Amino acid sequence: MTGGDFGRALAFVRAIDDRSQTRTAPHPWGAALFNEQLPRAWSHNFLRVDPPASTATAERLAAEADRLQGGAGLAHRSVVVPDDAAGARLAPGFEALGWQVERLRFMARRRTPHRPARLDTVEELGWPAFRPALEAATRREHGHEEETIRQLVDRTVVTAAAVRLRHFGARVDGQVVSFCDLYSDGRTAQIESVATSEEHQGRGLGSAVVLRAAEEAAVAGQDLVFLVADDDDWPKAWYERLGFDPVGRTWTFNRPGPPPTGH
């Protein structure tokens, strides 16, 4: 069983996932989680594989995803493997099936940042101020199909019902151009949904937003502050400069469905 900071972070994420679903369905290596209000949100509709899952194969898990997610009318398929060794074992099989393979690095704040940031440029935002910035960032990343955008933005509303949620952002000319979320439960906090509009990157705004959220979590008594980064993308090195160190890794395997009608 995974312990330490990584184990706490996994338990934190699992608790949010469990509270955010509207139903579950068992499979031989865990359970499928569904939120029937958000069928296009992969992070709220996936198969979770519990360790040790020694008999699981990519082919068997893909078949279970077809049975459960396909049976629910979902277009996508998604399998989440919290155990690093199991994910590494399954990855070649999913690649052979043509699925997307994503390695996620869990990183805990353990050090001071390499350079200070102007935390006074960051403010705590209410939902009315935060939502337009989140919607704009979601459109930049996922396109402009309206129902998909609505569901991806409304994930935040679902999450707010599962855990304490705060928003932090930096403005330029009155507009929120950099932001993040802070989830917390009294002991543990996660920084999530970090984004800065492209035209305002390189000015230290993203660093200030992340560090302000981390400071707020520490002041509120959270003794573990973590975030999750793509293990194959550049932000992980940026987070290391902000004082976050890797503590563990999980895997996600996805097969997108066809674009929604009108996309």
Image (spheres, rainbow, N blue to C red):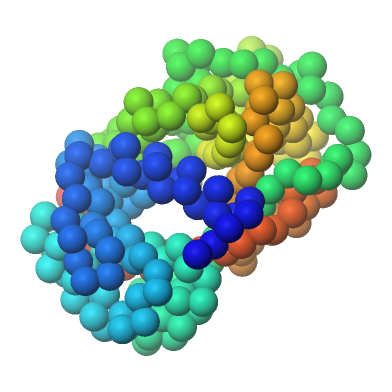
Number of numbered tags placed on the structure image: 0
Residue 200 position (above or below residue 10): above
Front one among 92 and 135: 92
Q: Where is residue 180 in the image (x, y as percent from the top left)?
A: 59, 32
Q: Position of residue 211 (x, y in %)?
A: 74, 32
Q: Residue at x 33, y 61 (%)?
A: 48
Front one among 53 and 198: 53
Residue 86 position (above or below residue 200): below
Q: Position of residue 19 (x, y in %)?
A: 32, 37
| 91 relative position to 59: left or right | right
Front one among 188 and 191: 188
Based on the displayed image, in which of its 4 quarters is residue 61 positioned?
A: bottom left
Q: Which residue is drawn at 41% across and 80% down?
A: 90
Q: Is residue 220 visible?
A: yes
Q: Is residue 143 visible?
A: no
Q: Which residue is drawn at 43% across and 29% down?
A: 163
| 104 relative position to 111: left or right | left
| 165 relative position to 68: left or right | right
Residue 119 position (above or below residue 202): above
**Residue that extends furthest to the right in the rendered view of this protein:** 115
Based on the displayed image, in which of its 4 quarters is residue 220 positioned?
A: top right
Q: Residue at x 24, y 80 (%)?
A: 60
Q: Where is residue 4 in the image (x, y as percent from the top left)?
A: 63, 54
Residue 154 position (above or below residue 66): above
Based on the displayed image, in which of its 4 quarters is residue 237 positioned?
A: bottom right
